[in-house]
Amino acid sequence: MRDRLLRLFGQTEAERTAYRNGLSLFFGALLGANLGFLQGMTLPQYVTAVALLAGTVMAFLLVGRARSRRYALATMAIYAAFLAYAYFRAGLFAGIASHSVDQLFVTLAMWIGAMAIVELTPLLPDSSRKELS
């Protein structure tokens, strides 16, 4: 029973790559749209926000592809801490409508959650999919 469920819900490396690419395309566009609605930012605020968001996105995309998961997770944790500091303490998003900032952070959280599901789903050898057909 466990093997059958594993084959049914597992994914091949090609499928995992397709899921990663699809999620990155969708959430990347959504994140860009959210950035477009952040009205009232000064240029230094905008540059800092874009740099932090770009680093965060690169860090969590690295988690699934890095040779060392520990290094990738540590990098992701550092960027998450920077974002949390910018949001809660440094006032990077001060003066901006809170719902716009909240949507930006919800988008990031959903992207991270979706990528976590893809990364935690068991990986199957490419030949195992043919058995289900």
Image (tube, rainbow, N blue to C red):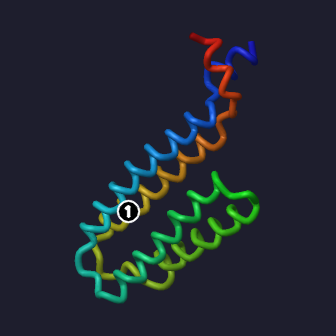
| Residue 34 falls in image quadrant | bottom left
Q: Which of 46/10 is in front?
A: 10
**Residue 46 percent across, percent down from the top left:** 34, 81
Q: Which of 102/34 is in front?
A: 34
Disc 1 element: helix
**Residue 66 percent across, percent down from the top left:** 68, 58
| Residue 101 falls in image quadrant | bottom left
Residue at coordinates 28% horizontally, 71% vertically from top-left?
Answer: 38
**Residue 110 percent across, percent down from the top left:** 47, 50
Residue at coordinates 37% horizontally, 78% vertically from top-left?
Answer: 93
- Give the side of residue 101 with respect to residue 74, left or right: left
**Three-letter code for the amino acid on which mark 1 is drawn:** Leu
| Residue 63 falls in image quadrant | bottom right
Residue at coordinates 36% horizontally, 85% vertically from top-left?
Answer: 45
Q: Quadrant of the N terminus?
A: top right
Q: Which of 80/53 is in front?
A: 53
- Give the side of residue 43 with respect to residue 15, left or right: left
**Residue 32 percent across, percent down from the top left:** 32, 62
How crowded is the residue under tag 1: few (<14 C-alpha within 10 Å), some, or many (20+)?
A: many
- Give the side of residue 109 with respect to residue 39, left or right: right
Q: Mark 1 = which residue? A: 104
